[in-house]
Image (tube, rainbow, N blue to C red):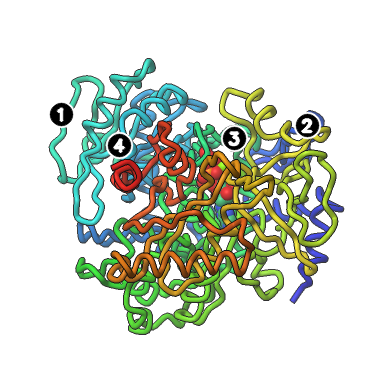
């Protein structure tokens, strides 16, 4: 095995040679003339002069070697549908959808907004856009009309691809009325709407605008649609950040750099190989879904599983099943990718479920999206008996910034740390007020990235270069560096620890504390399933910590039990972090408010605590969670 530190050093010291080598992992129609153009910082243009196509790399180039192997495996415990498409079948479906889009007037560079559940047609639509050079803008299915409308206005799509309905835990959510309302609200109107009809909800169709996918498919079955050869720097897609900290940002990505970044990450980070099966439990509406449900595995010649349903179902559609593990066994999954929030849901189930299936094909489970607390990491690691690899990244980065490059050197992980900087990323920890690099160990600062940023990183904010530069590159005094807006430290072995977002810091009597550190201590208590800590204004101390805890065992947190648990939690924090971090109150709740991508909405909880308006909640998952907190605090 190679040494990761040599691998990393070369990627930053001899960066162009390094990436020129990685660029050979994909097919180019015209090879790049220049590896990197960094003449206009902070913009980085990768593989200039090269032409390629994401769809070609994901499908066409595999046809000879593995045309009849599975490429896309669709499983829904919502509808009971299970269907696998070989690379050849996927090739045909994508061309058919591409021909339909062309017939509706979509041209290269036009935007196509995709608002769909986790069904095959969503993947066909994404790949069809890539094939013809249209820019896809996938919006998480089930977002309310308001959020959808603002994205339609921002993207100005020629066509919107959608479906009659999504389904979650057996509850049908009709999409079409939400879409119609969103189009009504939006100043921009799409020329056409293309609809998958799953037979879940009735649809009213607007004459002349709305088309059924199956009607157009009937006309275009067998269509041959060649790949458009795009400039490496041409836009492949835009996607919005989760909106945890405020208004979502429209992240814009290129074509060639992204293809190379993903192609390289499959062997180097995931230790994944062609012909195997990759299972990512995210949603196509998020960046993880773009990179590791759709493009990454297919570019690597792997089969990818697209799963619609809750993690707690069974293939037989019964609740309390172990669907994930059933799929691992059935499709011999080698690499799995999920999020801590989903694992925490499973943690409430019987651990025996994990032992029921043959999971011997699995080599590692990757988790991303939010901090992986130690108890959750340990629980799943012991249950599966494979390495659990945390990985830290952002919608902006497109692929992991900090993790373990499992295919380069199987470095041991450390609980609580996502690992070390990935090749190509110049990650630094800076003092937020002076901008000085913090070289001392375990000194807390802002995690930043020095340019030039590696391939796959966002090009800019869609139609707003100024916002891109001002938001991300000007927040640290005196230096043009990209701020992740996350706190971190680095230990003696070079491992990074992410300590939360820069706006999740509280100031207690002049001392700055990360809410995340307090949460970590509380989540170590055996009866705590989930926790959120926020800073609440306090006349005396400036701010105090207030904790919201979802107990693992709901009985016993009434009355005296609650008082006892509250006391234990307070003592625990005081013992481990000091009295300043001790929450002034611990509230027990049944659920915490999160974004649709499963991230804690601390700012909303904080606003409620302080009696303020909770602000923009359009990206929120279950409004009832916040409602219950409001009732608890302001009865
Ligand atoms: P917005 O930028 O709109 O407020 P967001 O930051 O939640 O939303 P994402 O791009 O989905 O949108 O999330 C990236 C953020 O998630 C990171 O900046 C970090 O705060 C957090 N995160 C992701 N992975 C990890 C991880 N492995 N450990 C700790 N934090 C993580
Ligand atoms: Mg963010």
The correct choice, above or below, for 198 with respect to 178 in the image is below
SS under mark 1: loop
Name the side, left or right, on which 300 lies relative to 547: right
What is the x, y in percent for residue 98? 39, 37
What is the x, y in percent for residue 445? 74, 49
Please give the label number shown on residue 162: 4
Residue at the extreme top: 187
Task: Give the mark nearest the N terminus, 2 or 4.
Answer: 2
Mark 2 neighbour class, 10 Å CA radius: few under 14, some 14 to 19, many 20 or more: some
The correct choice, above or below, for 509 with respect to 347 in the image is above
Point out the frontmost of discs 3 and 2. Answer: 2
Please give the label number shown on residue 230: 3
Closest to the observer, 566 or 391: 566
From the Cβ of disc 2, is ligand 2 less than 8 Å away?
A: no
The residues tagged by marks 1 and 4 sit, at their Cα atoms, a distance apart of 13 Å
SS under mark 2: loop
The residues tagged by marks 3 and 2 sit, at their Cα atoms, a distance apart of 23 Å
Q: Residue at x 78, y 69 (%)?
A: 493
Point out the frontmost of discs 2 and 4. Answer: 2
The residues tagged by marks 3 and 4 sit, at their Cα atoms, a distance apart of 26 Å
What is the x, y in percent for residue 417? 64, 65
Please give the label number shown on residue 41: 2
Q: Which residue is mark 1?
A: 204
Name the side, left or right, on which 429 lies relative to 271: right
What is the x, y in percent for residue 272? 57, 67
Q: Residue at x 50, y 27 (%)?
A: 108
């Amino acid at each position: 095995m190679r040494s990761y530190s040599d691998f990393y050093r070369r990627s930053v010291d001899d960066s162009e040679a390094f990436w020129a080598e990685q660029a050979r992992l994909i097919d180019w129609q015209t090879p790049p003339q220049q590896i990197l153009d960094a003449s206009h910082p902070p913009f980085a243009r990768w593989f200039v002069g090269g032409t390629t196509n994401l769809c070609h790399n994901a499908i066409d180039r595999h046809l000879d070697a593995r045309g009849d192997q599975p490429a896309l495996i669709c499983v829904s415990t919502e509808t009971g549908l299970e269907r696998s498409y070989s690379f050849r079948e996927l090739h045909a479906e994508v061309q058919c959808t591409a021909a339909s889009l062309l017939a509706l007037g979509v041209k290269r560079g036009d935007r196509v907004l995709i608002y769909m559940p986790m069904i095959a047609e969503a993947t066909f639509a994404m790949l069809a856009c890539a094939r013809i050079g249209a820019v896809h803008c996938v919006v998480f299915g089930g977002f309310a009309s308001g959020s959808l409308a603002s994205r339609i206005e921002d993207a100005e799509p020629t066509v919107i691809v959608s479906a009659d309905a999504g389904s979650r835990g057996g509850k049908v959510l009709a999409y079409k009325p939400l879409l119609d309302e969103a189009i009504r609200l939006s100043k921009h109107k799409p020329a056409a709407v293309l609809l998958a009809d799953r037979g879940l909800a009735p649809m009213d169709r607007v004459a002349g605008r709305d088309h059924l996918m199956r009607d157009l498919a009937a006309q275009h079955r067998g269509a041959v649609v060649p790949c458009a050869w795009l400039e490496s720097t041409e836009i492949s897609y835009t996607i919005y950040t989760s909106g945890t900290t405020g208004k979502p940002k429209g992240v814009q990505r290129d074509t060639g750099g992204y293809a190379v970044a993903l192609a390289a990450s499959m062997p180097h980070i995931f230790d994944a190989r062609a012909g195997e099966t990759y299972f990512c439990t995210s949603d196509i509406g998020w960046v993880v879904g773009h990179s590791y449900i759709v493009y990454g595995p297919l570019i690597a010649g792997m089969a990818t599983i697209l799963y619609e349903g809750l993690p707690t179902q069974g293939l037989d559609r019964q609740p309390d099943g172990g669907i994930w593990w059933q799929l691992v066994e059935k499709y011999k999954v080698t690499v799995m990718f999920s999020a801590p929030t989903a694992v925490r849901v499973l943690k409430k189930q019987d651990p025996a479920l994990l032992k029921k299936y043959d999971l011997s094909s699995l080599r590692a489970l990757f988790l991303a999206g939010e901090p992986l607390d130690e108890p959750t990491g340990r629980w799943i690691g012991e249950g599966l008996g494979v390495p659990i690899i945390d990985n830290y990244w952002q919608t902006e980065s497109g692929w992991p910034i900090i993790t373990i490059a499992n295919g380069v050197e199987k470095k041991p992980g450390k609980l609580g740390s996502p690992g070390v900087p990935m090749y190509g990323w110049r990650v630094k920890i800076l003092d937020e007020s002076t901008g000085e690099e913090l070289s001392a160990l375990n000194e807390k600062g802002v995690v930043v990235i020095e340019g030039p940023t590696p391939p796959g990183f966002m090009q800019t904010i869609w139609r707003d270069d100024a916002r891109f530069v001002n938001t991300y590159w000007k927040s640290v005094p005196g230096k043009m560096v990209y701020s992740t807006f996350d706190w971190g430290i680095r230990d003696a072995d070079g491992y990074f620890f992410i300590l939360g977002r820069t706006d999740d810091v509280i100031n207690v009597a002049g001392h700055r504390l990360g809410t995340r550190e307090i949460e970590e201590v509380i989540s170590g208590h055996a009866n705590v399933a989930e926790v959120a800590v926020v800073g609440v204004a306090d006349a005396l101390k400036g701010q105090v910590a207030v904790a919201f805890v979802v107990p693992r065992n709901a009985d016993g947190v009434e009355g005296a039990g609650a008082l006892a648990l509250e006391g234990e939690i307070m003592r625990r924090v005081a013992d481990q972090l000091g009295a300043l971090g001790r929450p002034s109150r611990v509230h027990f709740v049944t659920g915490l408010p999160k974004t649709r991508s499963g991230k804690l909405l601390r700012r909303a909880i904080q606003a409620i605590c302080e009696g303020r308006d909770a602000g923009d909640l359009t990206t929120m998952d279950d409004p009832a969670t916040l409602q219950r907190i409001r009732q608890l605090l302001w009865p």
